[in-house]
Image (tube, rainbow, N blue to C red):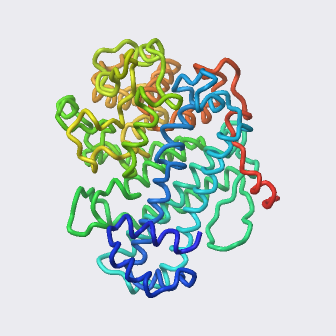
Amino acid sequence: MKAINYLLCACLLSGSLSSCKKWLDVQPKTNISERVLFENEQGFKDALSGVYILMANQGLYAREFTMATMDVLAQQYDVSSSTHTYYETGKYNYKDAGLEGRINQFWNRGYQAIANLNNLLEAIDEKKGLFTDNNYSLIKGEALGLRAFLHFDLYRAFGAIPSKDMESKMLPYVTRFEMKVTSNLSGKDFVAACMKDLNESIELLSAHKEVNYGVADPFRSHTRNHFNFWAAHGLKARIALYAGDTQTALQSAQTVIENAKLFPFVTRTSLISGAPSRTFLSEQLFSLYMPTLRDINEGLFKSSAAPSLLTNQESFITKLFEGSSTDFRWVFLWKEDGVPAKLMPVKYWEDDIQTNTLNTRRVPLIRLSEVYYIAAEAATSSTEKIKYLNVVRSNRGLNDLPQNLEEALIQEEIFKEYRKEFYQEGQLFFYYKRKNKLRIDGYGLDMSAREYILPKPNDELEFNKN
């Protein structure tokens, strides 16, 4: 968690290898300090860039915390063969060494990124005079938003089932860069800490509402690759719904929906083009660029990837998409591969398109469709719920739902949308946990806290007695 960790990462991200090398040539590695790192505005940019690179590690969002382990826990793939890499994961055998190691990475790398954010945040106010072009509010706003984002994902994984227990003290919300144990907070206090950071983030980022694709300043390019104003509102809606605060969830979702033109839905025409964005880039509020995504895809979602191959039986997939011949997520995101041919999810494939790596190598973390689903779940009238759902359905090639659906059927439609929309993205397990679903298709036993709450690393249990 030293400054060197993210300085080197930032060098790689920014492309300033020559200047970093020159700096390292005259500065012994053992003496690198945050004082030197934060001596100018570029140092703060590099530090923040380094956090994004930590998040893009395969142990976090590049692989395991999205498309791999988390979706295996949601039973999205058939891993029933005892020789499959994720066999024990599909059985929720948290004592398995391989799965335990991956879960420990979630915790350790998540809190490592948080520590680096805290280091930046502790330094930034003292150095406010260094910043130009309103970059102080941009960098501090991003850092606070990322701190809330990372903490909340850790809480979703390691915290209690929210509908059953928001009182137990489960996880620490760390806001200081120091070698000191931080006490665990209750679920209510943890969510309040997330919201405090998010509200300050929103205030700071309110001067940066534009959505950039490429501008003269590389740091301001590709807004979706940064935690931005709209992502903050999307995350606020997600957290509020998770905690049962439907009023705040709806208000935050509506803020994004009222400005949805900034994140236009993909069209059928764009998906049949020579260089389609199968992750639906234009709809992403927040995503991470993953330079190794092609290799990750080859190792998980190609027929040659056994024993790590992640797909499912054709009967499962047909049922998932209800036999639709028009749903974009079925028509364009699944293809046959291998001999004999198997249906494979191709959201992250590149080899059959005209590659534009800035468009293809993205893993979505918050997308526009989720905001509509949150609004549909949080709205107070059936008419409003169905209206929000139909916006997404019509932009996925599906017919509108009828206006006379009862509440139970509306909730079932929301559930089916989560299963289709977030395949390979790691969001479905957290939906199941929030709803405290008793059964998950593909797992023959009842679900409980044993399956839904990931175990903390042993050293955390040993050293943090709080």
Image coordinates of residue 57 in percent, x first then y, are 49, 53
Q: Residue at x 46, y 47 (%)?
A: 62
Quadrant containing the N terminus in the rendered view: bottom right
Asked whether 356 or 259 is in front, the reply is 356
Image quarter where the C terminus lies is bottom right
User: Looking at the image, which is closer to me, 81 or 119?
Assistant: 81
**Where's residue 308, x and y in %?**
52, 32
Report the number of numbered marks: 0
Q: Quadrant of residue 208?
A: bottom left
Q: Residue at x 29, y 38 (%)?
A: 350
**Where is residue 226 drawn, in percent x and y?**
38, 58
The one of 383 and 153 positioned closer to us in this rendering: 153
Q: Is residue 34 visible?
A: no
Q: Nearer the viewer, residue 267 or 78?
A: 78
Instruction: State left or right for residue 464 relative to residue 123.
Output: right
Which image quadrant is residue 329 in? top left
> Relative to 77, does residue 372 appear above or below in the rendering?
below
Q: Position of residue 445 (x, y in %)?
A: 70, 20
Q: In the rendered image of this protein, does residue 38 appear above or below residue 354?
A: below
- Is residue 159 in view? yes
Q: Residue at x 43, y 61 (%)?
A: 202
Please tell me which residue is depicted at 42% across the width and 31% down the height of the picture: 301
Query: Does residue 432 appear to the left or right of 251 in the view shown?
Result: right
Q: Which of the 4 quarters of the picture holds residue 369? A: top left
